[in-house]
Every structure is written in structure tokens, then in C-alpha cells.
Image (cartoon, grey):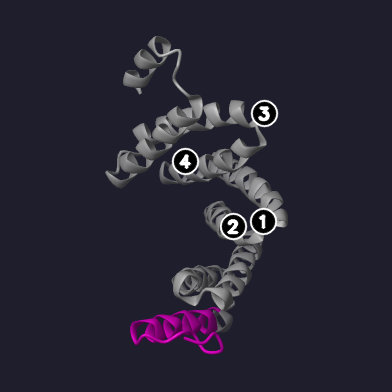
């Protein structure tokens, strides 16, 4: 991040929101290259900027939640599960509140953040809590897929796979197998150009 720390003081007209967006995007590109430590520094800087912006601008809150969710992923990749869980839970809190007033827009974001929470809880051995989180993800994505199957059925299938993993980790293998079969059926029907049973084409 040395390039940014040198550049910012010389750009008094720089728009912080644009800077945060650039840093967030940079973190994603670095993650795609497996450069997790550098990506973490970029997204941490994005979170710091967006937190300041959110303190005075309600419109900036959703961007803060997005960066917090990304931060949780980077921390998880580096094995820092407790810190990642805190970031993901903060993102969930923000997206849950936003989804109360604009569910069509924010429910997908809430599901993504909850999925991260479930992953972190699982890694920390908190399996029952992780299961509750992924069950909520499945519930949300099932509702979204009823309205827009082409967009959300793949996400539902992934959530069902994760649900199966959590159930298996708790010894509930039969239930896990049912979730896995449903995920496989969704993928089979999508490959054939069909929707999931009961959801239509």
C-alpha cells in the first residue's frame, strides 16, 4: 500500500469514497492472485475509510458492510478466524438492518455475509451456531430463487452443499445427504435448462 500512502497527501481533492472503492477492488484482484497479506492491507484501509464515511453518511453504510465482508474472507484465508468472524458478524448486522427496508436489494448480501459467518464458526468448532447461520442462508436463497431462479439457483445449490457439510460435522449424516441430493438435483436441472422442482423454468 506504499503507493497509496504516498499519493493521498498530495491529492487533497481526492474523493474518499472513490479511494475506498479502488482499495476494495485492489484487494479483490490481489486475492485472485493469492496475495492475501497485501489484499488484507488494502481491504483494511478500505474499511477504515468507509467507517469514517458511514459515521456521517447513511448511504455509505452498505459499502462499509461490503468491505467488512471482504475483510472477513481475507482474515479467514490467513487463519485469523476470530477476527474474521467479528468482521462478518458486523457485516451481517448492517445488511440485516438494510434488508428490513429493501429486501430485494440487500437479502443477497445478507446471505453472503451469513455464509461467511457460518464458515468461520465452523472453523472455530462452533458447529451448532454455524449450522443455524447456514440454515438461514438456505432459507434466504430459497426465497430468492423462487422469484429469480436463473440468478439464485446456483447460490442455493452452494448453500445446500455447505449445509450438508455442517450437518455431517454434527453427525447428522442422513439430513446432510438429503441437502446434498437437493443440491445435485438443482445442478442437474440447471445443466438441462430446467429450474428446480416447484420453482418453474
Q: Which residue is mark 4?
A: 75
Query: Residue 171, can we see it?
Result: no
Circles 1 and 2 in contact, beta carbons < 8 Å:
yes
Q: Which residue is mark 1?
A: 102
Q: Which mark is residue 105?
A: 2
User: Which mark is first along the chain, 3 or 1?
Assistant: 3
Q: Quadrant of residue 114?
A: bottom right
The magenta stretch is 176-201
**Label 3, label 4: how many angstroms apart (C-alpha)?**
24 Å
**Label 4, label 2: how many angstroms apart (C-alpha)?**
26 Å
Q: Nearer the viewer, residue 148 or 143?
A: 148
Circles 4 and 1 in contact, beta carbons < 8 Å:
no
Q: Is residue 160 above or below residue 196?
A: above
**Label 1, label 2: how many angstroms apart (C-alpha)?**
6 Å
Identify the residue at image location x=51%, y=87%. 200
Where does residue 171 sit, x and y in percent of width and height?
Answer: 58, 74
User: Which mark is first along the chain, 2 or 4?
Assistant: 4
Q: Which residue is mark 3?
A: 55
User: Which mark is first along the chain, 4 or 3?
Assistant: 3
Query: Residue 6, can we see it?
Result: yes
Secondary structure beneath label 2? helix
**Label 1, label 3: how many angstroms apart (C-alpha)?**
21 Å
Q: Is residue 118 above or below residue 30?
A: below
Amino acid at each position: 500500500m506504499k503507493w497509496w500512502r504516498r499519493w493521498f497527501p498530495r491529492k487533497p481533492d481526492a474523493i474518499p469514497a472513490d479511494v475506498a472503492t479502488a482499495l476494495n477492488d485492489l484487494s479483490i484482484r490481489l486475492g485472485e492472485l493469492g496475495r492475501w497479506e497485501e489484499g488484507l492491507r488494502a481491504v483494511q484501509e478500505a474499511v477504515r475509510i468507509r467507517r469514517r464515511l458511514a459515521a456521517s453518511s447513511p448511504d455509505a453504510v452498505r459499502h462499509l458492510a461490503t468491505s467488512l465482508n471482504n475483510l472477513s474472507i481475507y482474515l479467514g484465508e490467513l487463519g485469523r478466524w476470530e477476527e474474521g468472524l467479528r468482521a462478518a458478524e458486523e457485516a451481517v448486522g448492517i445488511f440485516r438492518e438494510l434488508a428490513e427496508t429493501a429486501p430485494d436489494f440487500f437479502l443477497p448480501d445478507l446471505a453472503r455475509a451469513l455464509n461467511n459467518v457460518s464458515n468461520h464458526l465452523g472453523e472455530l468448532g462452533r458447529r451448532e451456531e454455524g449450522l443455524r447461520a447456514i440454515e438461514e442462508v438456505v432459507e434466504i436463497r430459497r426465497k430468492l430463487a423462487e422469484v429469480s431462479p436463473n440468478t439464485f439457483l446456483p447460490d442455493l445449490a452452494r448453500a445446500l452443499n455447505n449445509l450438508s457439510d455442517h450437518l455431517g460435522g454434527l453427525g447428522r449424516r442422513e439430513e446432510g445427504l438429503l441437502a446434498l441430493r437437493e443440491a445435485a438435483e438443482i445442478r442437474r436441472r440447471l445443466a438441462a435448462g430446467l429450474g428446480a422442482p416447484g420453482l418453474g423454468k
